[in-house]
Image: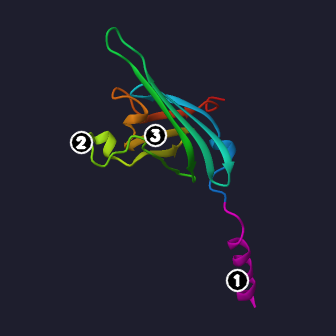
Amino acid sequence: MFKPILIAVTLNFAVLPVFAQDPNQVEGHWSGQGEGDLTVDLTHVQDDIYKISIGTTVAMEGDIPGCGGGIDGEVKLDRKGGNFFVENESYDPESTSPGLKERYCEIGLTFAEGRKLLLEERSGCIGYHGAACGFTGELVHDDAGL
């Protein structure tokens, strides 16, 4: 008698939608440091899809030039984070330059305690910033101190 009830309850929970991430916890402006200043803006689109914009800047010091750059698109996120891929506009499989031989710019995103976002530039992104900066670093959500 209890077995049919248990099966019915289990099936009811199995068909409920599963939301990967509470948009209110993810959306907004993130800022922090890596090789320079990093920013990320996340806007919820639908379900587990977010619009993302990543920026990096390294200030000029004396005669040493700074650099900067950015990239944007859409990323699928779950509670742990996700992987952001953008097709590399300068992709050339015949190139001898490592930055141009990669078909995609790939950036890993990991959510950590304390409203932190860890970025890890994995490959193919040099065309979106300069040689003196990158998209790897630790960021904090702007409302983390509230």
Which quadrant does the N terminus fall into? bottom right
Given the image, on which type of amino acid does mark 3 rest?
Leu
Q: Magenta residues?
A: 1-18
Is 97 within the magenta? no
Q: Nearer the viewer, residue 65 or 81?
A: 65
Snapshot quadrant of residue 12 = bottom right
Residue on which the image places disc 2: 96
Q: Position of residue 47 (x, y in %)?
A: 67, 55
Q: Residue at x 33, y 29 (%)?
A: 131
Determine the secondary structure under disc 1.
helix
Q: Is residue 55 above or below residue 111?
A: above
2 or 3: mark nearer the eye: 2
Q: Residues within 10 Å of mark 3 (few under 14, many from 20)?
A: many
Mark 1 to mark 2 CA distance (whole Å): 59 Å
1 or 2: mark nearer the eye: 2
Q: Residue at x 62, y 56 (%)?
A: 20
Looking at the image, residue 115 sits to the left or right of residue 132; the answer is right
Residue on which the image places disc 1: 7
Q: Which of marks 3 and 2 precedes in the sequence?
A: 2
Q: Residue at x 24, y 42 (%)?
A: 96
Determine the secondary structure under disc 3.
strand
Looking at the image, residue 93 sits to the left or right of residue 22; the answer is left
